[in-house]
Image: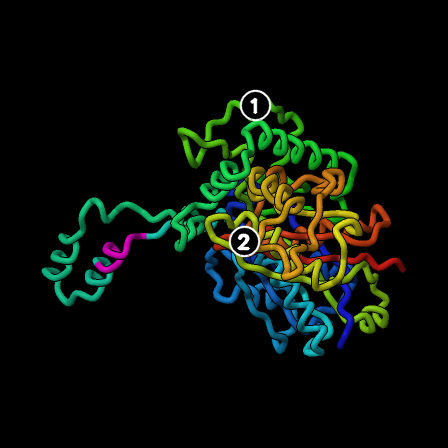
Amino acid sequence: MESPVIVGGVRTPFVKAAGAFNYVPAQELGRLVVRELIERLNLDPATIDEVITGNVAPSDAPNVSRVIALRAGIPKDRVAHTVNRNCASGLEAVTQAYDRIRSGQAQAVIAIGVDSMSNIPVLWTKSLTDDFLAFSSAKSAWHKLRALARIRPRDLAPVIGIKQGLTDPVSGLMMGDTAEKLARQYGISREAQDLFALRSHQRATAAWSEGRFNDEVMTVYPERSKGAVPRDVGPRENQTLEALGKLKPFFDRRWGTVTVGNSCQVTDGAVALLLMTEERARALGLPRLGRLRGYAYAGCDPSVMGLGPVYSSNRVLRATGVRMSELDLVEINEAFAAQVLACLRCFESPPADCLGTDGASALGPIDENRLNVNGGAIALGHPVGASGARLVLTVLNELGRRKQTLGLATMCVGGGQGGAAIIERIAD
């Protein structure tokens, strides 16, 4: 089998929904990162065999990956497809690219994660849609009037697409409700959640002030915006525990502890990574930054979907034989502070169904000095389809800066799954 390596990656700034990227659709965000990546590496677009894109939010471009590829200048005879594993869609794109190269089906694949949460549509009810269809197909003015007369005020209430997308149809819970459940189950206090959120902002702002994101993030000049967007919009240098403490619970307004301050931000953004065979990278004189040592996905109860990283990380650690103590860095996507804190409890004391037949697991405690060292989605934001690819890119870049070897990128997935990948830096 081929040995895939990651030769480069870049992302847009992550921008709050309805902000500077409000009029930048997913296909344009994806095109921007692909063009930037190709130009940074001084590559002929014909070098690329395939484009795989993780995307969740509905887009006005069918098979958004194909649209991105063509508009980015990838030759039309190359293939592209879009994948959706909910929150882990960007990670799915990366692991599919890895598999395509490893199996010999491609030599160079761009993996993209992208979402424009600003452009998630507001939908009409089914009854109103039926009335509109009856109106449009009516043969006479009289029948058109009859169709319109059937419309009732309740039919005019829109279906909010983002709320629908963040609600699990199996458990009936919104993602924030699952975080509340974990907070209650593991006794995670409001103060602990706010302290974790504050640390996310502090670490993200420090990363920006010290230039650690400079090579990772491109500057974007969006149309219909007042200027350039050179950095992430979410991190707050002046964030305080007092300000976080004033926010009211959002999901369980009476008894809850999960607020918009200790939850991930709703954002727009895109990430692109280029994977190649090691031989092809050497031949083109490209850097070999790192590789995937392995990856795994795992299912769990949708009502505690936030524990997905525990199950998927245990699976990939077992498969690769890597010990927790060997990991130099760990990135757990910060969907909610309560969710990450619950995962930390379970990494240290795994649930019974995480144990093997020998009664053991591959998990262990995570030193907070190795965890999300540049902040996470609470400060940076969580463009759902992009975050998995962002975790891989961030781990890879930080391993390079520190001259360290192994990192874990893992995340929970709406619907009750987890994804995890072990990234290994190549020391040339």
Q: Is residue 29 at least partly visible in the picture?
A: no
Q: Quadrant of the N terminus?
A: bottom right
* Residue type beneath disc 1: Ala
Residue 128 in the magenta stretch? The answer is yes
3D distance between C-alphas at marks 2 and 1: 29 Å
Q: Which residue is at the far right?
A: 428
In the picture, measured across the screen, residue 284 lies left or right of residue 160, that is right
The residue at the point 83 percent across, 47 percent down is 401
The disc placed on residue 243 is 1
> Which mark is drawn over residue 146?
none
366 magenta-colored = no
Q: Is residue 424 left or right of residue 27?
A: right
Asked if 200 appears above or below 322 in the picture, the reply is above
- When asked about the image quadrant of residue 134, the answer is bottom left
Q: Residue at x 79, y 48 (%)?
A: 328
| Residue 267 in picture, x, y percent from top left | 55, 44
Residue pictured at 49% horizontal, 53% vertical: 301
Amino acid on which disc 2 is placed: Val
Q: Position of residue 35 (x, y in %)?
A: 68, 59
Quarter of the view holding residue 141: bottom left
Q: Position of residue 68 (x, y in %)?
A: 59, 63
* Dot label at residue 413: 2
- Circle 2 SS class: strand
Q: Which residues are magenta?
A: 124-130
Label 2: few (<14), some (14–19) or many (≥20) C-alpha neighbours in 10 Å? many
